Image: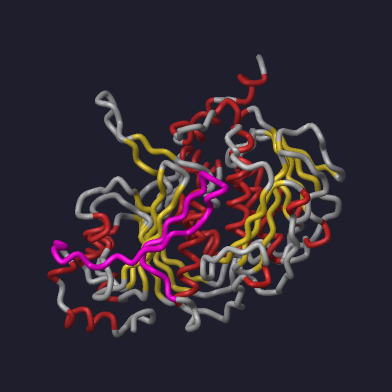
Amino acid sequence: MNNLQKNITEWYRSKVDRMRRVDGVFIEKLATSSVTLLIDQNELNYYANQVMVIVSTILLSNWCNTIHVVLEQDQACIVPGFEGNSIKSIIEELISSNDDEITFKFHDTVRVETDAYLSVGVPTIDCPFIVWMNADGWISGHGKSLKTYQKISKSINTNPIGSVFSACLAHSVLFKIILGIEDEIEFSRWLSLYDHKMNTDTTTLANPDIPDIDFGKIIQVGCGAVGSSFDFILSLTKSPSNITLIDYDSVESANLISSLLFLKRNALNGDKKVKVCSSILEKSNCNPTAFEGDYSEFIKSGRYSENYPDLILCFANERNVWSTIQNNYPPIVLHATTTPNWGINYGRHIPLKEWCIVCRFGIENSNATPVCAESVIESSQTEEKPILVVLPFLSPVSAVITFAELVKLSMNTAPGAKNLTQFGMRSTQHLNFQSFQWPKKENCPVCSKQYKEVYDHFLNKSKYYS
C-alpha cells in the first residue's frame, strides 16, 4: 500500500468530502502532508498563547494526518475549561479525541522533515514554509518567515478574540502553502477586531480591556459548525449568560472538519449537536438550556413569549428559520455567512432601525448561507441535494467575528459598526474588512408590516436595545 492510499482512508474521505468541492483544494495533498507545530516556550504562560495553541491543535487535527509538536518544556494551562491540565496533555487529548487515525509525536527540538511549520509565538527556525502567529486581547498578528515576526506586549485579560482569529488566519496561510497556492513570499499582518483597523505598528491598534460582562438572555438558533465553534469560544471566557441552544440535527463525519468542538466520537455515536454544545457551556460560567427541535417548534412551545431574549444568534438556514425569526418580533439579531471563495459576511439587524433578516435573505433560501460554515453551489440535474462546500477555518472565523460583535454590544465605549461586514481570506495581499450600511426594504413582506407599539412592548425587556 503506497503512502497516498494509506493516508486517504474511508473515514478521512467522509470527513473532508465537502472540502474537496472548493476550487484549488486537492485532498491528496492534504492527506499526505505533515505539519510541525512550534510552540514558543518563553510566552507559553500567557492566556493568549495558550488559546492559540489549543485552537491551532484543533484546526490541524481537523484535516492533517501527520502532526509533529515541538514543546521543550510543559506548562500548566490557565484557560477556562482546561485549567489544571498541562499543555502537553491537552494537545494529546485534543488530537487523539479529534481523530485516532492521526499520526502525531512530541519533540523537544525542531523537526526538519516536514512540509510546513506553524509557530505559536516566535519561530525557532527560518524557512520559506513557516507561518507564525501572535496575539493579545483584540489584536491579531500572523506572517511568513522569521524576519517578519513581531512581538507584542501581553496583558492578563482573558480575551480569546485576537488569539482565535490569529490562529485561523495563520492556518489559512498554512493551508495555502500545503496546496501550493500561497501568493506572497514574506509578509506580516496585524489588525484589531475591536475596530477592524490594520497597522504594522501594534501599539496603534485598539486593544481595550473587556470589563466583566453578563451577555444576558441569548437564543442561539443552530449548533452546526459555526454555532458549535461560537460556543467553544464562549467557553474560553468567564463571562456568564443564559443561552438557549436550538438544533434538531446530529453530528456527522462531514461536520468535524469545520468545527472547533465536534469530535470523532460525536459523529460515530450520532450525538445531537445541541447536547454537545450544551455540554461544553455547562463547564463554563454560562447557563445553557438545550432545545432539541427546530425554531418553529421552539416558538410553538411557548418558551419564546414566556422569556423574551436580549439577543438572537442565527446560525441556521433550514426550515424557514429567517421568516420565523422575523415574524415573532425579534430583538437584535446577529448572523454570518460563508462563501465558496474563502470569505465570510457578518450581519446585524436592529429592529425598527435597520434591515431585518428577511430583508437580507428573503423568505426562501438565499445563495448566501448563514453560518453553518457551508456554502451552497448548484447541483447537477442528477443530484437530489445541493452540494455543500467548507473550509476548516471559515466557521471559526465567522464565530469569532460574531463573538467580537457581541462583546462590543455589551461595551458602552465600543465603536459603532455598520450592519454588513465582509472579510476575505483567499488573498493574503488583500486581507481586509469592508463594511456597508444597508437600510430597511420598504417592501419587505415582514418588517414593513410590523408595528412599533408591539415592538416597544417586547424591546423594553431587552438589554441591548435603546
Is residue 370 found left or right of 168 in the rendered image?
left
Q: Position of residue 438 (x, y in %)?
A: 29, 65
- Along the line of sight, which residue is nearer the eye, 345 or 127? 127
- Along the line of sight, which residue is nearer the eye, 191 or 247? 191
> Residue 250 colored magenta?
no
Q: Position of residue 18 (x, y in %)?
A: 44, 35
Q: Position of residue 424 (x, y in %)?
A: 48, 50
Q: Residue at x 82, y 55 (%)?
A: 74
Is residue 316 found left or right of 108 in the rendered image?
left
Residue 167 in view in this figure? yes
Q: Position of residue 315 (x, y in %)?
A: 38, 56
> Which of the 4 image quadrants contains residue 244?
bottom left
Quarter of the image where the N terminus is located: top right
Residue 67 in view in this figure? no
Report the magenta residues as a range: 416-445
> What secondary structure is the stretch in magenta mostly built from?
loop
> Residue 427 colored magenta?
yes
**73 above or below 251?**
below
Quarter of the image where the C terminus is located: bottom left
